[in-house]
Image (tube, grey):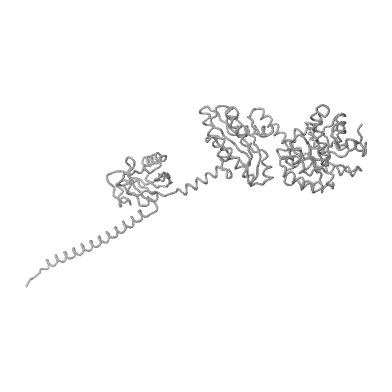
Amino acid sequence: MVIISNEYLGQLDQQTRAYQQEISERRRMETALRDALRARKELEDIVCHSPLVVFRCRLTENWPIDFISESVSQFHYIPEEFYTQQRMFTDIVHHLDRKRIRQEVERALADGEDEFVLEFRLMIPHHAVRWVETRFLVRRDTDLTDVLHILVPPVGRMVYLQGIMLDITERKQAEDMIRHQAYHDTLTDLPNRALFQDRLTHALTRARRHGTMLAVMFLDIDRFKTVNDTFGHAVGDLLLKGVADRLRARLRGEDTISRLGGDEFTILLHEIANADDALSVARKIVQAFEQPFLLDGKEIHTSTSVGIALFPQDGSDAQTLLHHADTALYHAKEQGRNNFQCYHAAMSEKATERLEMENELRNALVQEQFALFYQPQACAVTGRIIGVEALLRWQHPTLGMISPAQFIPVAEETGLIVPLGQWVLHQACWQSITWQQAGFPLMRMAVNLSARQFHQHNLLEMVAAALDETGLPPEYLELEITESVAMRDVEFSASVMQDLRDMGVQLSIDDFGVGHSSLIYLKKFPISTLKIDQLFVRGLTTDPNDQAIATAIITMARSMNLRVIAEGVEHEDQLAFLRACQCEGIQGYLFSKPLPPDALTELLHFAGEAVMLA
């Protein structure tokens, strides 16, 4: 019989409990290890299968990569390239971005900053480029809880750069598109006003630094509004695109062409040797318009006018140069369009006078400073008054009577001719009715239509309103259109004239003979009268050519059953020649100068219905 002491039993019990604790601890550790392995596997799955590229590189020379996730394949790389071929982080960064990234990392290390975000480009195999946004983390080997340090334990004591990389190429492309749209014209894709101003400012800075010359050009399309009104805005847009293409083809790549808006373009010529360089380019631009534009099956003939300002002689800042180029453009328009002009100081003086004239015109409209004078038109044979022409006069309170030659061009250009012309039309119709009410028979009232008035979309409504409000029968209103306006667009002119004739209004071609009308085109116009320009009447007794032209016009008009009125008749021998040619009517100082309404009323009272020539 074995006797076990209580002491031994106590020791055995202690050992049993120790074994049980060891087994429990081992099971706990095994469970923890399984959990850790499962967590590690989950972490590996997250890192390796995330669309984000996770990487770690050592901050030694060229930044070798010791870990990169499988998702780098979206950039056409595989992780093994970085492990076996020693491909470095700097190898895949675009060469233009490497310096910036290094500087940012050096700054972060110096400032003790552990996290920062950069956007840069990656070089993709086969010369492609992708934009990425990367969140960089600065890690040291002592960061034992770091995720990548758990997955890939660090080797040696050094600083690591970890990154989480996201492809943002599409976002960058969208940003580039938005930026492009903000600084480019949507129709022509040319730089807009903002981008042109920016480039001009930078170009001026360089020109001052290096002592070089540059040129600013301002140009627009002659009679562009006519194209829009005649063919529609769709064709007008095609013309603007065509102009942009022709300008691009005639300028250097480093020069800037901009569309400011409408039909206005500006050009910046960098680093020219002298003014002749700018003139040569301007000449090429004007020549570029010599060939017609084929747009939507239509041949569009147009031209351009160009103003030029040079740095430094014509201005030292962007605004001054643009203003002076615009002033030179206006001068080119005054010279007949289809040409180019360099700015000079006298142009600014003239522009100032023009601006003052415009302001005075606006005041004159409000203050009713305008008046109509009337010049009789008489039968060449009997001297009987057969009509009158309404002529606008400006009675300025301090400057006195201002010639129409001074203010009509300004009114036409600024658009003031439209309300002014509407007043003239209404006043002339009202005066005709006033004379009728005074006991005189109705006479044909001739009223001039300017180019802008003729192309107004509401011309017919304006004429109808004047007739309705005054009660003048339409057959006693004759609207005069100059030959040059009528021939600018024959089809459009013929259409508008026919609409006016359908209202019962009479039509005449003014200044006939100074333009380029052909009989074929003239036949398309539903006119009743031709007016021989005074240029030919002046030389009737001295110039055989003027005699031949006047005779031909009268003969042609008679064959077409048109009235002929000769303007500017001042001498008896001119009248004798016109009578011999059977010219129907005359107008000029030989019979009467333009008279205010009261004076013409007295003339009508004095002569009755048969004012005779001596």
Can see residue 371?
Answer: no
Task: Count the labels in the image.
Answer: 0
Q: Nearer the viewer, residue 505 or 313?
A: 505
**Quarter of the view holding residue 453:** top right
Q: Is residue 269 left or right of residue 223?
A: left
* Quadrant of the drawing holding the C terminus: top right
**Quarter of the view holding residue 227:** top right
Q: Residue at x 77, y 45 (%)?
A: 497
Q: Residue at x 75, y 32 (%)?
A: 406
Q: Is residue 384 left or right of residue 197?
A: right
Q: Nearer the viewer, residue 299 or 151?
A: 299
**Quarter of the view holding residue 545:** top right
Residue 327 versus residue 466 in the image, above or below: above
Can see residue 165?
Answer: yes
Residue 205 image point, x, y percent: 52, 31
Residue 66 image point, x, y percent: 31, 47
Q: Is residue 68 left or right of residue 380?
A: left
**Residue most toward the bottom?**
1
Residue 428 image point, x, y percent: 82, 41
Residue 590 image point, x, y percent: 87, 31
* Quadrant of the drawing holding the N terminus: bottom left
Q: Nearer the viewer, residue 105 or 299?
A: 299
